Amino acid sequence: MKYNELTRRYFESTSKAGMLPDGFRGAAGHLAQGTWVQFDLRIEAASIAEVRFLAFACPHTIAVSAWLAENSVGHALRLEMPYSIAVLRELFEVPVEKLGRLIIVEDAWRAAAAAAIDSAANAPISVSRADRRVTDA
Amino acid sequence: MNPPIYLDHAATTPVDERVAAKMLEVLTGPRWFGNCASDSHDYGEAAAAVVEDARAQVANAVGAQPSEVVFTSGATESNNLAIWGVAHYYRQRGRHIVTVRTEHKAVLDPCRELERRGWSVTYLAPDRGGRLDPQAVAGALRPDTVLISVMHVNNEIGVIQDIAAIAAICTRHGAWLHVDAAQSMGKCAVSFAASGADLMSLSAHKAYGPKGVGALLVSRARTPAIQLAPLQFGGGQERGLRAGTLPTHQVVGMGAAFELAAANLPNDAMRIAPLQQRLWQGLGAIGGVLRNGDARHCVPQLLNVSFEGVEGESLLAAVRGDLAVSTGSACTSATAEPSYVLRALGRDERLSESSLRFGLGRSTCEADVDTAIAVVRHAVVRLRRIAGT
């Protein structure tokens, strides 16, 4: 399998791998099926402030997850990923056979974003656990 | 940047300098360019002489008679000629073949093609260590069984099958035995005569010889001797079994490589066995690492291990800058297929994918092994951290 330079770079330097203890979490896929992705989002003022990811997956999926974690900061919180599957596929030259794995990335992202949005809907003042902590203080 | 350490000697080996020198001599010398089938002049006779020398070298190296050596383009062709040739020659006698799930594709695919054309094939399962119980062969034989095909050394896990015991069962039943011994030369002792096999496939490039040449040993020990229907026609070379002008330099290369491999076998085995042990101890210490194949019946040149908690394609990608190894999955496409050999041993899909095959060879040294351990450890730890496993 050949990987483009961006894929190799983000596969090899995954500084955003990990979890946010107070982040909003969403996951998709299954280890038993070979692909599993999880995102933790920290939201501040309805914007994405920090992202961490975990992935049991191929290099393309790991690189896309790592890149999303780095490049989504500052974007407004929405259910959709800040970058579409089409854009990610082109950037990382993901083979068509692997599109299903990008859908798993998207599902994990949407699950995390949905958790954040649900929380915001239920919290009249703050939109994140971190904000709530500050407000409470 | 240093090139990756080559640990894929089960896939192919570099051509030995001494072999290359012999080949070059034949390629560039003034005497050997003739067609070895042209006995009407000195050039043809000179080529025929070196071909026959090579035939004798191959035969001596594997305990066969020179007249039993049929040169081919490699083990894949040899396997096809053996299976296809027996199936078609004896099609009136029976149309049942027995083989093993862990065979190379060059055996399984011809068998599947024969199934599509009306033959019946029984695929036996090995035990969890990859060994085939000879009694399983006995249990699979039918009155219409004409051929049993069992490999000697498995190309993924290095497990050696008990060919002599299987041959005895085949002989009693009156069925022919074909042995794919593509991996055997230079890794363990090979004796065609003592094995009891009727057909044996050999490859030059797995034993520091050139690619593009191999042989099928066709026994003359039994009476009546085994017969084969040829795959190709047009010249009657190689006893009518393999038409086409022989590539003199390739054949000479195979002869030289086999002579060297037989001579080096004791030293190679003594030197490489501790390296394999060192590699396994180092990898095993990472934790969550499983060895594939019965270590008690394995050649020292091969080590196949599965890593828990890492994805196979990522594991291979993480080490490929430093190591040239093979993965347990046919990872040439996105729809990576887990190793059917490891699946046949009972490994689950994930562990079958997350395996690496280390093929040690003549150039492998302790420093290579230590580097390999360090590289794999780093990759496994990093991927497990990323996966949260």
Image (cartoon, rainbow, N blue to C red):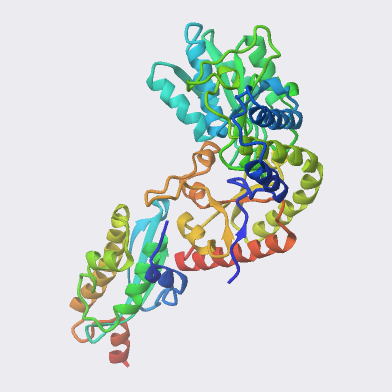
Residue B376, how many percent across, how many down?
A: 59, 62
Can residue B127 be seen at all in this image of the molecule? no
Q: Nearer the viewer, residue B73 or B235?
A: B235
Compared with B285, B145 (above or below) is above
Q: Nearer the viewer, residue A127 or A83?
A: A83
- The answer to whether residue B8 is left or right of residue B123 is right
Image quarter (top left, top right, bottom left or bottom right) of the N terminus of chain B: bottom right
Residue A134 quadrant: bottom left
Can residue A55 be seen at all in this image of the molecule? yes
- The answer to whether residue A96 is left or right of residue A16 is left
Tell me which residue sits at (67%, 21%) in the image: B68
Compared with A20, B386 (above or below) is above
Compared with A9, B10 (above or below) is above
Residue A8, how many percent across, how many down?
A: 43, 68
Tell me which residue sits at (54%, 20%) in the image: B98
Tell me which residue sits at (66%, 65%) in the image: B371
Residue A63, how many percent across, how many down?
A: 38, 68
The outermost residue toward the bottom is A137
- The answer to whether residue B96 is left or right of residue B301 is left
Q: Nearer the viewer, residue A132 or B152?
A: B152
Numbered disc total: 0
Residue B53, how many percent across, how many down?
A: 73, 30
Residue B67 quadrant: top right
